[in-house]
């Protein structure tokens, strides 16, 4: 198996997911307001501010892993991808298939993390 090629495929797939979602967040996608409301955030101004921050972070992380796949960033991306899938179902109002459809959003970064190797110490999380 060509590990370097597999790593690049997962880096590009993860970055694509995060760039796409980041751009939607920067645009203040109204369809996502219901997910904030599902966790008790209902003020539109607060939601727009949070979406702006999420969008910036998502795009920054996507660019980072294309430049250098830092394990702690990839772990965050896997957790964030899982959270954003779960906010649709079972936490949010959408059917289970909205959750299933987003498995790649957390599965690709998680696979990349394991392909790169689980860190053996604290310092390796930042390499």
Image (cartoon, rainbow, N blue to C red):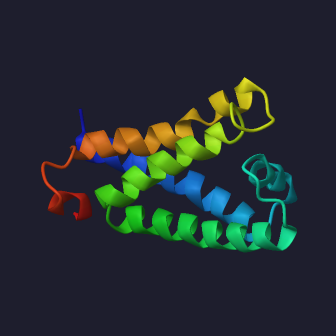
Q: Is residue 65 left or right of residue 126?
A: right
**Depth order, front residue of 16/77:** 77
- Which residue is drawn at the image coordinates 13% and 48% (left, top)? 120
- Quarter of the image with the C terminus is bottom left
Q: Position of residue 73 (x, y in %)?
A: 38, 60
In which quadrant of the rendered view does residue 86 lie? Answer: top right
Q: Position of residue 23 (x, y in %)?
A: 69, 65
In which quadrant of the rendered view does residue 22 lie? Answer: bottom right
- Which residue is drawn at the image coordinates 71% and 67% (left, top)? 51
- Which residue is drawn at the image coordinates 53% and 50% (left, top)? 80
Q: Residue furthest front?
A: 40
Q: Position of residue 104 (x, y in %)?
A: 54, 37
**Image height of 89 relative to 20, above or below:** above
In which quadrant of the rendered view does residue 42 lie? Answer: bottom right
Q: Residue furthest top?
A: 96
Residue 119 can be seen, yes or no: yes
Q: Is residue 94 left or right of residue 19?
A: right
**Image height of 117 relative to 58, above or below:** above
**Image height of 48 relative to 16, above or below:** below
Q: Position of residue 29 (x, y in %)?
A: 81, 61
- Quarter of the image with the N terminus is top left
- Which residue is drawn at the image coordinates 45% and 41% (left, top)? 108
Q: Residue furthest left?
A: 120
Residue 13 can be seen, yes or no: no
**How many numbered dots are placed on residues in this image?**
0
């Amino acid at each position: 198996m060509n590990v370097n090629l597999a790593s690049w495929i997962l880096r590009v797939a993860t970055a694509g997911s995060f760039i796409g979602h980041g751009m939607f967040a920067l645009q203040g996608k109204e369809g996502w307001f219901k997910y904030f409301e599902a966790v008790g955030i209902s003020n539109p101004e607060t939601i727009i501010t949070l979406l702006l921050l999420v969008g910036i972070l998502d795009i920054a992380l996507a660019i980072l892993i294309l430049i250098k796949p830092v394990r702690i960033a990839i772990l965050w991306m896997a957790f964030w991808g899982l959270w954003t899938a779960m906010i649709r179902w079972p936490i949010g109002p959408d059917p289970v298939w909205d959750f299933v459809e987003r498995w790649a959003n957390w599965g690709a970064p998680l696979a990349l993390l394991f392909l790169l190797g689980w860190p053996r110490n604290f310092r390796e999380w930042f390499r």
